[in-house]
Structures are given as structure tokens and as C-alpha cells.
Image (spheres, rainbow, N blue to C red):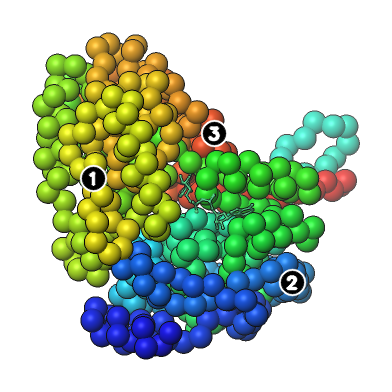
Amino acid sequence: MDDVVTTFINAQGVTEATSAFLARSKAHFIANEWHPSGESMAVLEPSTGGLLAEVPCGDTATVNLAVAAANTAFKSGEWSQWTPVQRERVLMRLADLIEENLQTLAEIESLDAGKAIAGCKEVDIGGSIDVLRYMAGWATKIDGATRSVSVPGEHFAYTLKEPVGVVGAIVPWNWPFNMAIWKLAAPLAVGCSIVLKPAQLTPLSMLYFAELCLEAGLPPGAFNVVLGRGSVVGEALVNHPDINKVSFTGSTPVGIGVGQAAIANLNPVTLELGGKSPMVVFADADIQRVVDATQQSVFFNTGQVCSAGSRIYVQRDIYEQTVAAIAERAASMVVGHVLDEATEMGPAISAGQKASVLEYIAIGKSEGARVVCGGEDPGGEGYFVQPTLLADCHNQMRVVQEEIFGPVLVAIPFDTEEEAIALANDNIYGLAASVFTQDVSRAHRLVRQLEAGTVWVNTHDMIDANTPFGGVKQSGFGKDLGPEQLDHYLKTKSVWMAL
Ligand code: NAD
């Protein structure tokens, strides 16, 4: 394996730190120690299909070990009882270490997840640093409240906010580092300990992060990583009787099962699931803004974006013009090797994902869609797909209703505001939506009527650590980010004192 990796690295010119990391043997991270396990799984590089690394594949015993470590840490007060300022300091140090290792982390993530490195540095790693610092700042600001009570006698009543305990967190492959940081920053800030399961396809960046956790001084058991399959490690984790909270990001079908397992143990659960987010474009919209928004959502990260604006409804007066402008920009995108700074779009994550995207394009064609750009298999090595625009679609088509999770945008014309709202809401998902118009009153009407966890006006896919993110309908429930996320990891205890 080392030979394969070394040759590849030399050809690509990654930093020495990346090269050394890829060559190191990999293990689960439990109680600040590395635990190998018998079976291993191959990690493939989506740009080439070649072998990038091998990592251990955990089982129920590995999960038991990690949950026990997290419980020991929590109950001993290591981390959970540290002063808020001590926790804040370690998390800030961790954010600094990520920043110092940004290039290495971005290279690892780009190779592992098929991400164009420029965007990966800015969004995946840079965005994660912001989230970690933001949540670290909250460690010192978790307060209960005094309550005025009206019962007879004299009483002093107040609430205490306490960490829920051990969190089982599961993340998908489309933002391996970023989603993991979203999952771990808030619970660690408030004093929970965590067992995190990365996606099977993209385990590497969390192992590098674990090395940084050691350097930052996170105590043993506060943060643990178990690698492996969802059907084994994921299931063992969410069903474990000794965890106190489940936090899941992934597909809706898997999320429903995860939610049921959590409820069976009466554990609270956060579910960040799939999406098919509409962009609604009125005739008075700035078309360049619309084009830019498609670039930052449905064509960014090869369209493997939960909140991607993957169906666009355009008022008929500007429909052809808008479709043409989007197609022109999409067709000019630089699709290439992920480590090239000029690359705008890398490959799909896997052969299976590429096949699924191509199948959806074929379904769209058979349903009567007009292919305005892309739509072909570019061939060659790796799992590349073309930025694709399917026009003249309607809401009864599968390509309009189902999450494709690739760089495929479907366009549908509409005539009236009422029609646009009805079409946009006619979907099982409700993660996000956007509206493009110069009419402020109309924008506000749409904001209120669109069924989505986030609505953007004249932009799409803007995300910040201070704004909560999460869906409605089949996109799940609960929020990541913002102060709202902290409550998912806190218990409120009411305290009464008779005076
Ligand atoms: P997935 O549901 O297949 O897997 C997600 C994670 O769950 C992986 O770590 C996987 O190993 C694990 N898993 C699989 N089966 C499991 C089981 N039975 N029990 C417990 N864990 C199990 O999703 P994916 O293909 O990795 O990711 C793509 C999906 O994630 C898309 O639907 C996308 O929209 C969604 N997503 C949502 C958000 C959001 O914030 N709403 C963000 C990113 C991705």
C-alpha cells in the first residue's frame, strides 16, 4: 500500500505532513489512544479510483469500548466538570491547530472526498475553524435563570443548564470534516463527551483531527472516533444503552431508523437529513445573482450538498434567458483534479454515486427533460460527472421530486407567485429554499410561505456559525449551529429552595 500512496503523492506534490499522515497506519481513537482492529477497509481516492489508505473497520466491541471511555470521562468530571474557561481555552487551541494545519487537512480532505482544494480550504476547513471558535466562546456563557414563583410561602427558584452526557454522533461523506465539527463543537463546549462515527467512505480527516486533539490537550475519553460501516458501528452506537443523545446527519431513510433507535432508548435525537431545495426566480431578479447562486450551491462540491438549490423555478418572462445564462457558466466550470487550485468541481464520491447521478440524468431524459448542458459520462479515470442542467421539467418528474445528490439542476417555468409557492412547497423535503426578486414585499411573503428551515433572499447556501441550520418535513428536526444548537446538548434542571 505504501508504494501506491508514495507514487501518488509524488505525482501530486502534497505537503510532507499529508504524505506522512497517509503513510501512517490508522486506528480508532478511543480515550486518547489508538486502537487497531482486525478487519480493515480500503479508502479510495475519487479522482482516480486508486487506493488512498486502509483503515480499521470497527465492530460492536469497538463501540462498547468507546462509549465506556466517553462515560468514564463524563462521570469522572474530566472535561464535563472543567471550568468553562478551561474548556474554551482547549477548544480555541484546537481551532488554532486546525488553522496551522489547514493546508494538510485540506489536502487530506480533497483526496479522500474528491473536493476541489480551493473551496475545501475556504469552506470545509475554514468554515469549521469559525464554528469551533464560535462554539468555544459559548462555553463561558451557558446560564440558567432565576424564576419568580407564585406558590404560597417564600421560595427561591432557578434553573441549571447541565450537559446531557455522552453523545453518539454520525456524519455523512459529503462534508466529512465540516459536518463532524458541526456535530462536536457544541457538545464539547457545554461539557458533553462524544463518540463520533465518520462515513465509511471518508474517514481520514477525523483521524488527523484526533491527532490535533491530543496536541490541544483534550482529556482522554472526551472525544472518540470509531471507524466502520453504518450497519455495524452506526447501529451499535445509536442503540447503545449508555449514550444520552444521538446526533445524526445523513440520508432521510437511514435517519428515520436512527431516530427510532434513539427513541427506543428515550434519547433525544437531532436529525439533519436530505433535501431538494427550490430556488424561486421572479422576472425582476438579477440573473447574475441567480447564476452565482447555482455555482455556490448545486454545482459546488459536485452537487453533493444537502441544501443545494437543485430545482429552480423561473418566471416565464426570463425563463429561457436564465436557463441559458446558468448553462453557459456551468459548461465553463473547470472540472479536474482536486489538488489543482484552479479546479472548481471534482469527482463524485464513488463509482456508485456516479452511476446513480447518471441514472437520474437518463430518467430525466426519458421523462421529457431537455438537456441544456452536461448530461454525458465524461469517461476517463475517477468518478467525474458533468455539471448538468435539465430544462422544461415539471413537478411530476422524479428528477424534480427526488434528491439526486450530484451537479444536476432541474429548471421549471412558472407564471404567478401563488403557483411558484405551491410548486416550491410540493416536495417531501424542507431543508432550505431561496427567492430571487427586487420586490421587498414579495420577498417577505415568500420567506413566510416557503416550507423550509432556511430561506435565503437573492442568494443561496450562505451559512454562518451564528445562524441555526436544519430542516422541516422529511429533512429532519433539530438545529446545528447558532445558540439554538446548544440546547440540544443541555438538560434543564429546576431547583427550588424554601427560604
Ligand atoms: P447515509 O445516510 O447513507 O449515511 C450517513 C451516515 O450514517 C454514515 O456515517 C453511515 O455510515 C451511517 N449509517 C448508515 N447506515 C446506518 C445505520 N443503519 N445506523 C446508523 N448509522 C448508519 O448518508 P450519506 O450518503 O453518507 O450522505 C448523504 C446524505 O446526507 C444526503 O441525503 C444529504 O442530503 C444528507 N446530508 C444532510 C445534511 C443536513 O445538514 N441536513 C448535511 C449533509 C448531508
* Residue drawn at point x = 25 percent, y = 32 percent: 390
Using residue 280 as the reference point, say whether residue 185 is left or right of it: right
Distance between mark 1 and mark 2 Cα atoms: 45 Å
Q: In the rendering, which numbered label is found on residue 61? A: 2
Distance between mark 1 and mark 3 Cα atoms: 31 Å
Placement of 392 over or under 3, stated as above or below: above
Placement of 489 over or under 286, stated as above or below: below
Looking at the picture, tell me which residue is in the foreground, 60 or 120. 60
Q: Amino acid at mark 1?
A: Glu
How far from the left and from the top, in percent, is residue 74?
A: 72, 68
Residue that badge 3 annotates:
474
Ligand 1 neighbours mark 1 (CB distance < 8 Å): no
* Residue drawn at point x = 51 percent, y = 37 percent: 475
For marks 1 and 2, the one nearer the N-term is 2
Using residue 344 as the reference point, say whether residue 8 is left or right of it: right
Disc 2 packing (10 Å; few <14; some 14–19; many ≥20): few
Q: Nearer the viewer, mark 1 or mark 2?
A: 1
Disc 3 packing (10 Å; few <14; some 14–19; many ≥20): many
How far from the left and from the top, in percent, is residue 15?
A: 29, 83
For marks 2 and 3, the one nearer the N-term is 2
Q: In the rendering, which numbered label is found on residue 376? A: 1
Using residue 78 as the reference point, say whether residue 107 is left or right of it: left
